[in-house]
Image: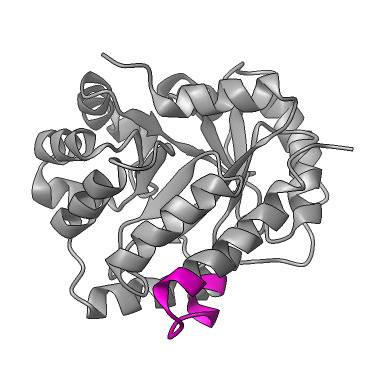
């Protein structure tokens, strides 16, 4: 089985003494061809790992910006099959690691074995299922791993130590640390207790830790980079896509690429 691209991305970032920049995109917003163009653009402008959101009608922790993008994509009739076809095409030109962020209900409807097989064949590297409790995830996680996919799980500030240990053990590639209690969305400042929580998690695991929820500026990326292995930026990037919707595809991709380059400037801690 080939080495996983996610592992290689974190190894490279660590060797360069910086955090990995991890943008989030909603697949199919404004359309899949534009999503493909953006993926290629951000791969060239500093993105290390991409989280690709699979549109879903009842998102669990997504704030209004990402929820609205899901609605726009679903109104276009975007399907998982279409998304995988897009990724398969992008893989002929781009080696950026890609994880899908997807609801367990979609995985269950397709079937875990079929979903993981199709994802791996398309060139996906990992899967995040935020509404799948870790104590119910053993079966899907094992299937994912047999297909070469890294299953990634989330830890929140309210997660007890025993459950942290369980999640840290089950996650592969990295651990997704949710910086705030609540939904996704750009914020003016990060929580004051973020560093203490990350220190607590570091005592439990040597796996890379990536921080998401609320990160929107190069300065916030720099703050995270001083204490974590990755910075995940979602709503701010999805908003940038929407702000440029209606422009030619290349201009949308260029605008998002420019923003990602700005964010990437913060991945080296002072």
**Residue 161 against residue 206 in the figure, above or below:** below
Q: Nearer the viewer, residue 22 or 177?
A: 22
Q: Residue at x 50, y 29 (%)?
A: 163
Q: Residue at x 25, y 74 (%)?
A: 74
> Where are the magenta residues, as a range?
240-251
Quadrant where the image shows the N terminus: top left
* Furthest residue in direction right, as rendered: 270
Q: Say if the magenta span includes residue 245.
A: yes
Quadrant where the image shows the C terminus: top right
Q: Position of residue 160 (x, y in %)?
A: 58, 33
The answer to whether one can see residue 235 in this image is no
Q: Position of residue 234 (x, y in %)?
A: 54, 59
Judged left or right of residue 87, residue 47 is right
Q: Residue at x 80, y 35 (%)?
A: 226
Q: Say if the magenta span includes residue 49.
A: no
Q: Position of residue 158 (x, y in %)?
A: 61, 44
Judged left or right of residue 40, residue 181 is right
The answer to whether one can see residue 36 in this image is yes
**Residue 131 against residue 138 in the figure, above or below:** below
Number of on-image labels: 0
Q: Nearer the viewer, residue 67 or 83?
A: 83
């Amino acid at each position: 089985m080939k080495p996983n691209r996610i592992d290689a991305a974190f190894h490279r970032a660590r060797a360069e003494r910086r955090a990995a920049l991890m943008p989030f995109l909603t697949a199919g917003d404004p359309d899949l061809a534009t999503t493909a163009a953006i993926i290629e653009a951000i791969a060239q402008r500093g993105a290390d790992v991409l989280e690709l959101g699979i549109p879903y009608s009842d998102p669990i922790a997504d704030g209004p910006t990402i929820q609205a993008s899901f609605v726009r994509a679903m109104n276009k009739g975007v399907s998982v099959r279409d998304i995988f076809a897009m990724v398969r095409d992008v893989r002929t030109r781009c080696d950026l690691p890609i994880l899908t962020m997807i609801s367990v209900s979609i995985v269950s409807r397709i079937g875990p074995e079929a979903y993981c097989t199709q994802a791996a064949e398309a060139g996906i590297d990992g899967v995040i299922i935020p509404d799948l409790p870790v104590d119910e995830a053993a079966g899907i996680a094992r299937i994912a791993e047999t297909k070469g996919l890294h299953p990634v799980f989330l830890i929140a500030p309210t997660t007890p130590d025993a459950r942290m240990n369980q999640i840290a053990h089950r996650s592969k590639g990295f651990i997704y640390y949710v910086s705030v209690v609540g939904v996704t969305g750009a914020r003016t400042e990060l929580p004051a207790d973020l560093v203490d929580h990350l220190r607590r998690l570091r005592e439990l695991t040597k796996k890379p830790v990536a921080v998401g929820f609320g990160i929107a500026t190069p300065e916030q990326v720099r703050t995270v980079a001083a204490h974590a292995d990755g910075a995940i930026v979602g709503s701010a990037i999805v908003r940038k896509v929407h702000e440029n919707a209606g422009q030619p595809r290349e201009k949308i991709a260029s605008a998002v690429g420019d923003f990602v380059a700005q964010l990437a400037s913060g991945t080296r801690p002072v």
